[in-house]
Amino acid sequence: MRVLLVNMPWAPIEVPSLALGILRNRVAKTMPDVEIDVLHANLDFVDWITERVEFHGRDYYYYSLVSYFKGCGDWVFSSALYDDPEWRLDEFRERLGPGMSESELALSEELHALAPLFVTELARRIADLAPDVVGFTSTFQQNAAALAAARHIKRLVPGTVTIFGGANCDGEQGAALHRNFDFVDYVVRGEGEAAFPQFLTALRDGEAPSAVPGLCWRDEEGRAVANAMSARPLPPGDIESPDYDGYFERLYASKACGWVEPKLVLEGARGCWWGEKHHCTFCGLNGSFMEFRSKSPGKFFDELVDLVRRHQVLDIFVVDNILDMAYVKSVLPRIVEAGYDLRVQYEIKSNMRYEQIGVLAEAGLMHVQPGIESLNSRVLKLMDKGVTGCHNVRMMRDAETHGLTVSWNYLFGFPGESDADYDDVIAQMPALHHLYPAGGSSRIAIERFSPYFNQPERGFAERHPDPQYSLIYDLPESELAELAYLFSSPPQGIGKASADRLEAALETWKHAYPYSRLTFCDLGDAITLVSRRNGFDWTVLRLEDPLELSAFRLLGQPHSPAALARKLSADPERIGELLARWRRLGLVFTESGTYVQIAAEARNQEVLRIAREHDGRGRRHGAETPELLPA
């Protein structure tokens, strides 16, 4: 039996497909009589399209990720799916054109017209390879391209078996995809490591695949059958390591090689340990299985080292929804000891302590996604995030100290939020310009599998499949409602005026960040702070008063004024005056009655030099009033 696994556009080009790498390795181990290979059709598309139109890496990134909530990537290949180069072109122009630049709109139309030719040529190539089974992985904006390729392959070689899997095939989505597209013979819903080899075994032996968990298939009368999905997630010991042989060679031969820095994709865990207890209300990640499972530390470390050595790639993207906190003491120190100069991206939770963030940095976790989402505790409670706004600011501050890039977006549109939840945060953003800014702001979408989707009584009772799906598929709304992952609903929370003010403040933050700075150096009997931020007219501030020194150090963690006064045995009125002055100076962030200091710890000699020179001009120790040096 010959099996070909296909990774269609718009899969990211800088990484191999983890899903196909896992399936390739699992089949190779368990079914040695099966010949299995991977076709990197996303890279094939890059080389094909760049010979025909002006197309660059930023364009691929746009269709792969940036336009996800518009559906532009899937719409491009809808023309190939329905054999119509002008498929819903007028509707696309009318609905999405006003929000696109002229060049984005023109390129989208050009790609839309060319997509059928690419898919036809690709299908012929696949047919010439004569596989018995062609498997497609579908995640994010791969659905239309994968469906189009499957349709053309079945036309050329009707006996070829087509099977789909991936995040776009989970739960009801997979059943709807199978039910509505008869050229898709099978769909795997849920984890595929066990189901896919079971399916291949049944196919080889000529048996009905009725025992394969989650599989969608057709009986002898052609009726669609959806097997019950497994009630138990895959044990962590059975989570397969990926086989990426062939990907890097293909990338290095592609035009895309000049666009990206290649990365390894690793998986240490599945599910979310926070979501098991408190499923964030807007989050649809993990689909059918929220239960958190992680590989043993030894297995994950060995897998990492093996892939790094095998492929000579030091940039690593870990797809876990959340870091297994046990890895901080088990895996990460081993990575430090191994001596590899890694650059790792990881999703973490924002309540990690300063020392833990330091361990991340030492191990090469240079890019983290802490799930910040908001700087207001009341809104964070509506999300069920389990952290406060001050906790999130503390994370950003400590990440800045350790040199970690923090990836986050500011979300709004939660039922029950108000303008007041944003007003004071926006007012304080100029003080935060030295911390890594949000990528932008966005109103939440309703995602399948999220609590907002599963429990419409939370505020989104009226919902419909996102409008993008009607541009892509020729299906009634009832079927789109089963196929879709994103849904639209009457907006909740803040209105356009507050949303615009939030976005404007974040844009200012993004532009100011490269030129802004706030650091401190603790010399024991004094603390010297250096500031370079627009809106604050001081450059160097020296704290020498014992009470202020103790208060600043305590504010490394969020505190209320009452807690500060109690711990310092100080007059509450004096503490209130101190905190008010520090807010005016941009030294603290405050919300929901708590404060946290926002200066990153200086990690170079510049501040120490400034402190010594400043002290050499005769400043006495123990002065009650800090000295300000104007900018």
Image (cartoon, rainbow, N blue to C red):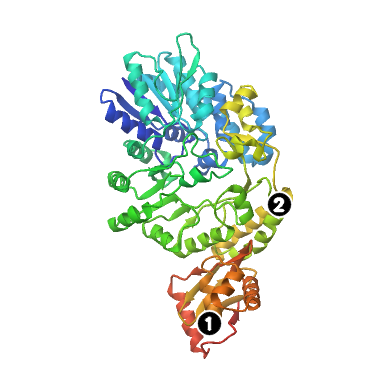
**Residue 593 falls left or right of residue 298:** right
Residue labelled with disc 1: 546
Helix, strand or loop at label 1? It is: helix
Mark 2 → mark 1, Cα distance in angstroms: 40 Å
How far across and how far down the image is residue 618, in percent?
Answer: 52, 91
Say few, some or many: other residues with alpha carbon within 10 Å of mark 2 (under 14 / 14 to 19 / 20 or more): some
Name the residue: 31% across, 47% down. 308
Could you tell me the amino acid type at mark 1?
Answer: Pro
Residue visible at 30% across and 55% down? 334
Residue under pointer 2: 418
Q: Position of residue 350 (x, y in %)?
A: 50, 55
Position of 477 with respect to 531 (left or right) is right
Q: How many marks?
A: 2
Residue drawn at (61%, 27%) of the image: 481
Rendered view: 3 above or below 380: above
Question: Is the C terminus in the top left, top right, bottom left or bottom right quadrant?
Answer: bottom right
Residue 55 visible? The answer is no
Work out whether residue 153 or residue 172 is closer to the camera in this orientation and state it: 172
Q: Secondary structure at mark 2?
A: loop
In the rendered image, the residue lying farthest to the left is 32
Q: Is residue 94 left or right of residue 78?
A: right
Q: Nearer the viewer, residue 53 or 300?
A: 300
Assess whether mark 1 and mark 2 are in contact (beta carbons under 8 angstroms).
Answer: no
> Mark 1 or mark 2, which is nearer the start of the sequence?
2
Give the amino acid type for the residue marked by disc 2 in the picture.
Answer: Ser
Residue 73 rendering spot, x and y as whole percentages: 55, 34
- Towards the viewer: 534 or 268: 268
Q: Residue at x 61, y 22 (%)?
A: 475
Along the line of sight, which residue is nearer the eye, 46 or 556?
556
What percent of the width, then of the height, locates residue 54?
53, 38
